[in-house]
Image: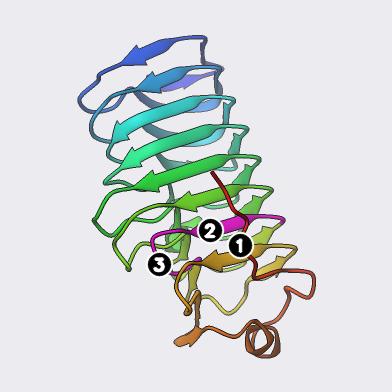
Amino acid sequence: IGNSINSEITGNEIIGTIGYAINLGTTNSVVSNNLIRNGQGTAVQLSGSELSFINNIIQDHSGNGISLNASNSTIYGNRVIGIDHGYGLEINSSNNSIYNNYINIFGDLSYDGIRINSGGASSQVIFNTIKVENSNLESNAIFINSASDILIKNNVFYNEGGGYSIYSNDSSLDKDNNNFFSTSEVWGYYNGLQYDDFALWLNDTEGDENSFNVNPYLI
């Protein structure tokens, strides 16, 4: 769906697609309460602006879960689970709010639970739980790739596969009340440095005074 406003996609079950299950390029539109499963390729692509992607389930999918190319949009209350060989959520656009989502990826290639590219500046990541079961050590729970003015608060970033729980080369992160954990001793990467000591992380990086580095024991 493209070149429209006030579109709504709700209450559908979409199974076994090859390519996009939903490809939306509109303004002020809503995608809610859909089940997308057992597909291949990018499940959902969102372009345009002021979109709401709310309370959807993407399950057992080979490829990216959500590709967000829409600005001033909201990704809220979704379950993106069983993503094999893809990003859970890739953000390429600015001023977006990402909150109350559960994202789970696995496989053996290098992908991230949440990946924020340079175009994703001024986005907020709040109250999300990210679990990475990917065995590739270059897979991260959250990867921030030169995106500025990112806020990350009240999240659980858990990398069961041994890669980083957070990888960021952005020094302007506003972060606190997060739990960063990896099954590897080295659990974080920030501005060219690896971290296995949370006290050192607190000393070197701003914020996270109320954050943790403990095993969340996610099932």
Q: Residues within 10 Å of mark 1 (few under 14, many from 20)?
A: some
- Is residue 198 highlighted in magenta? no
Q: Earlier in the sequence, mark 1 or mark 3?
A: 3
Residue beneath the point at 79% across and 70% down: 210
Coordinates of residue 91 in the picture (x, y in percent):
45, 50
The amino acid type of the residue labelled 2 equals Tyr
* Of the pair 64 and 211, the residue shown nearer to us: 211
Residue beneath the point at 49% across and 50% down: 131
Residue beneath the point at 62% across and 53% down: 125
Residue beneath the point at 40% across and 28% down: 59
Q: Specify the quadrant that holds the N terminus.
A: top left
Q: Which residues are magenta?
A: 154-165
**Residue behind mark 3:** 162
Please identify the quarter of the rendering in which residue 140 is found: bottom left
Q: How many marks?
A: 3
Q: Specify the quadrant that holds the C terminus.
A: top right
**Residue behind mark 1:** 215
Q: Earlier in the sequence, mark 1 or mark 2?
A: 2
Q: Are marks 1 and 2 in contact (CB under 8 Å)?
A: yes
Q: Residues within 10 Å of mark 2 (few under 14, many from 20)?
A: many
Q: Is residue 90 left or right of residue 217?
A: left
Q: Is residue 164 left or right of residue 74?
A: left
Coordinates of residue 50 in the picture (x, y in percent):
58, 34
Please identify the quarter of the rendering in which residue 43 is found: top left
Q: Secondary structure at mark 3?
A: loop
* Of the pair 196 and 21, the residue shown nearer to us: 196
* Of the pair 109 and 99, the residue shown nearer to us: 109
**Residue behind mark 2:** 158
The amino acid type of the residue labelled 1 equals Asn
Look at the magenta stretch and give its main secondary structure: loop
Relative to 136, does residue 66 appear above or below in the rendering? Answer: above
Relative to 115, does residue 9 appear above or below in the rendering? Answer: above
